[in-house]
Image (cartoon, rainbow, N blue to C red):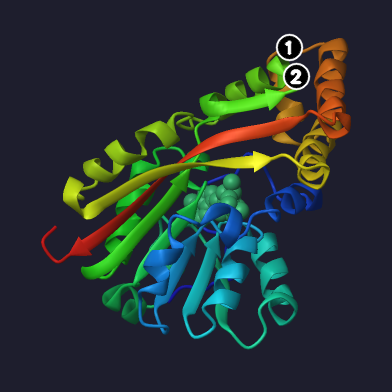
Amino acid sequence: MASNNQTTGKQNYHIGYKEDTLKAFELRNVTTCLGYLVPTLEALPPTFTLLDVGCGPGSITFDLARRFPQAKIIGVDLGQEVIERNNANIPLHAPGTGIEFRAGNILEPESLFSAEEIGSGFDVVHEHTTLICIPNNIEVLRKMKQLAKKDGGIVACREGDTHSQLLWPPCPESAELQERIYEMNGLDTQTGRKLLSKALEVGFRRDQITASASVLSNITAEERLPYAGSMITMLADENSQYRRATAKFGYTEAQIEVLRKNMERMIEADDGWRLLICTEVICKLDGDS
Ligand SMILES: C[S@@+](CC[C@H](N)C(=O)[O-])C[C@H]1O[C@@H](n2cnc3c(N)ncnc32)[C@H](O)[C@@H]1O
């Protein structure tokens, strides 16, 4: 197996790994994000193996390990620094469980897994809003299918779609900038709505797929603050992709100030919320495809 300590390949992640951003992602857990998958996991033998692709700061991964302490759970991510942070947090967030984190590019599985792990495959290969962050993400889904056990393995995805986002107070400037940044990075902003067709495209039969949808939300003040706060931090950081995109697209200082104010309103507004439709698929291999 190649070193786990290298971030390989030429991939790049446009959101970045600043502490504020990680804190916003850390609102996510099994209850808020994986309702669609829990009954399937509960039906597996308790020692199942699960791969969390693009685990980020790992709040979902840690929560899975706490709920299924006998399972072998591996979170993988392109970000070396986020993986080091996660490994350091294991004694705090999921002591005594079978969790581990590895850094690398999912498109280069041999950089992440031993030949034995690749050969035997995982019971569950899961991702949460990772596909939308990777160009040509059909290849990621194809790899996920290859990494699942040929007979009985499960590929589970929950994906967003930037066009399905509702913000109040309205922030059209923020929505527009986000859209342009995703497009600038060659990302498929409609990944959510195409999830089922992507699953079919990589070779799952429709009768192997269970599809559903739910909403990812930032509603309470505690949920709005990390989301909008991380956007404000990115706008203030001259090196962030968000800030660099404002320069690339010729935003004036006044326009950047509007963006910042929008996010401040989102934090302060008692009637504020952010809602994003997420699509979900559970694809079960049966040895036939
Ligand atoms: C939007 S975040 C989602 C994090 C986590 N799944 C969650 O929902 O909280 C997407 C993650 O995918 C990771 N990622 C992007 N490209 C990747 C690749 N080629 N291989 C592995 N991870 C990747 C990023 O580093 C980032 O942490």
Q: Quadrant of residue 224?
A: top right
The image quadrant that residue 185 belongs to is: top right
Which residue is at the front of the view, 164 or 150?
Answer: 164
Q: Amino acid at mark 2?
A: Ala
Q: Secondary structure at mark 2?
A: helix
Judge left or right: residue 206 versus residue 171: left
Which percent across, then down, holds residue 119?
27, 76
Q: Are marks 2 and 1 in contact (CB under 8 Å)?
A: yes
Classify 162 as above or below 74: above
Q: Provide residue 203's location: percent of width, then percent of height.
A: 19, 48
Q: Is residue 111 above or below residue 98?
A: above
Q: Amino acid at mark 1?
A: Gly
Q: Quadrant of the N terminus?
A: bottom left
- Which quarter of the figure has residue 177? top right
Side (left or right) of 58 relative to 188: right
Residue located at (84% from left, 16% from top): 258
- Return the residue at label 2: 247
Foreground residue, 179 or 111? 179
Counting from the top left corner in percent of width and height, residue 246 is at 74, 20
- Residue 250, disc: 1
Residue lying furthest front in this view? 271
- Give SS at disc 1: loop
Which residue is found at the position 64% from the left and 54% from the top? Answer: 28
